[in-house]
Amino acid sequence: MSKIELKNVTKVYDKTNKAIDDLSLIINDGEFFILLGPTGAGKTTTLRSIAGLEKINSGKILFDDEDYTSVQPAFRDTAFVFQQFSLYPHYKVFDNLAFPLKSRLRNLSKDEIKEKVEKIAKMLKIESKLNNKATELSGGEMQRVAIGRALVRDPNIYLMDEPLSSLDAKLRETLRVELKNIQRNLGATILYVTHDQAEATTMADRIGVLEEGKLVQVGTPEEIYNNPKSTYVAHRLGSPRINIIDEEILSLKDKPNNTKQLGIRPENIKINTGTYEGKIRTTEALGAETVIGIEYKQIELLALFQGSFKGIKGDNIKFDIDTKNILYFNDRNENIS
Amino acid sequence: MKKLVIKSKGLSDKAIGWLFIAPTIILLLLINVYPLIYAIRMSFTNFYANKLTQVVKNVGLKNYYKILGKEAIWEKMQITAHFMFWTLSLQIIIGLSLALLLNKKFKGNELLTTTIVLPMMLSPAVVGVFWGYLYNPQVGLFTYIVNFFYDFGSFDMLGSGTLAPWAIVIVDTWMWTPFTMLICLAGLRSIPGYLYEAAEVDRASKWQQFVYITLPSVLPFLLLALLFRGIENFKMFDMVMELTGGGPGSMTELTSMNLKREAFEKWKTGYSSAYAVILFVTIFGFGNVYVKVMNKIKDR
Ligand SMILES: Nc1ncnc2c1ncn2[C@@H]1O[C@H](COP(=O)(O)OP(=O)(O)OP(=O)(O)O)[C@@H](O)[C@H]1O
Ligand SMILES: [Mg+2]
């Protein structure tokens, strides 16, 4: 496993827009790093550049401080889980898993290969499918085989492009825990791409938030959650999403100068107490919690209520805002708390 | 609940379907199936098309015994097999190689493809005639080019018993390699690029990528090309007829040419009907077995 460093990497597909723009990033040895960003932000492009599948236009890519910018993919020794599963369609699951081990750069015996493949198959619960053809699998099984094909190896870095996206919720949760365990046990370096913030917060050692090819913030999940640099980053983490409202709506006394907007996390709005009064617009039960949409001065605030909620749409409701945890943003959407 | 039954007026869907394909079916019956049945019937007779006044007698399986008992048909089969083996092998190997080359992106790619495909567009008889000129021992371009690299002196591709079988192999390969190339190219284009990317990241060598990804993906296409060319070359007639006329002697007389000779020079209509049925059964049998194998490979 290695430390991976990107230095001012820029990748341009067509002249007009940059898929990744002056991106600098260090992924430490043994770190689980998650790239978060909306569609088109350049997540896949970043992974492909590290794997060597895309030629970058400028910048450097270092593996353990060694320059790998123009090294062929095979010699970078990365393991890639592609967004489309990209299994080898003519082969059985076993041979798909064994394929990376058959490289002549590796030189493993048949027994070693068999042992490794079976271990991984067991871990990903696809032992019974080893003799199926790759095309005779469900989407979730294909994705697990794709993950397995990366995990049989011991590469410099694992690059995973939304590997859990087509699995059902339960399996996703299991694999999330499993992947995190594997990563800890192996001390693996993983760069992982996702849209799913639950994945990001539960697995990541650090998160990088991408916006239109630019890395806007890097930090631990707590840092990103509690102290987002901008409204954009604030929106990326947290479910239900953060309330971003004009500061005039609350007209608070203690606030930084040039405050334009306020960010209030739903869990920081307490209901049935306090001085504010609004109307219930929506309620959404999430099991142990309820998300309540409160109409207040023509806007909607989302509040998170612990326990099951008895209110009815249209009722008046009192609420309080925990002012200690409010985030303040200026007119450039930057956090100035 | 009340069931809604809508009764359509006029023809049912099925009837309309039949109506649409009826003209084709009638035509096929008329020009394919009827002559086939007629030929089978004649193969049991001693009918001569040039002796219409003679009484036609039923001779049973005598024609078949006669044909299969003679050395000639096996000789012709051998000549045909030689022709088929070499043309098919060369066309598959060269066709696949060219397809691999043209599948790469480079400047002039499309122009080159068009140029390579040209021979296929010509009429086989025309090809036969002008290769006849190219092979000419005195003024032929082919002879000249070969002698340019190594001086064999004057040699006659079409006149020599050892060279003539190769002369027809060369022409057929020249003409039909573009066909196998096109089919292989279609196969190559159908392979998604990310498979190669995955293999590259998995550290597979170029050779491994070829063996594990390219070959299995184009194999069904290759087999299809082989089937088409196999059937075509089994009944090859026009090009070789123009080129050598079966000569020298009968060194390049393929089964189809032999058949034509029996039917339309010696006018042994009953006899040659039996001959044709034998050839038909041969290729039909081979074709069927082949398609079964091909499907099995595709399902693998
Ligand atoms: N092969 C390509 N040719 C041209 N433009 C491309 C190519 N691949 C990606 N792009 C562009 O680069 C930008 C970043 O794409 P990328 O695939 O990295 O996004 P992403 O963050 O992975 O999105 P998603 O979450 O939808 O997978 C997009 O604007 C996309 O249109
Ligand atoms: Mg992507």
Image: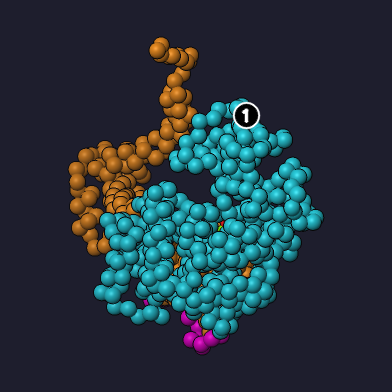
Protein image colouring: by chain
Q: Residue A285, relative to residue B203: is it above or below?
A: above
Residue identified by numbered label 1: A316
* Residue at left offset 71%, top offset 54%: A328
**Callout 1: few (<14), some (14-19), or many (20+) C-alpha neighbours within 10 Å?**
some
State the image coordinates of residue A289 (x, y, percent, origin top left). Answer: 49, 41
Q: Nearer the viewer, residue A3 or A161?
A: A3
Q: Is residue A5 visible?
A: yes
Compared with B36, A22 (above or below) is: below
Residue B271: where, in percent of width, then height? 28, 49
The chain painted cyan is A
Q: Nearer the viewer, residue A244 or B274?
A: A244
Chain letter, orange: B
Whether residue A11 appears in magenta in the rendering, the answer is no
Q: Quadrant of the C terminus of chain A?
A: bottom right
Give the residue displayed 38% in from the left and 55% down from the top. A174
Dominant secondary-structure state across the stretch colored magenta = loop
- Quadrant in which the N terminus of chain A is drawn: bottom left
Q: Which residues are magenta?
A: B148-162
**Is residue A21 found left or right of B169 in the rendered image?**
right
Picture quadrant of residue A118: bottom left
Residue B181, horizontal then vertical, whole percent? 50, 63
Residue at the extreme top: B2
Of residues B63 and A154, the one drawn nearer to the viewer in this rendering: A154
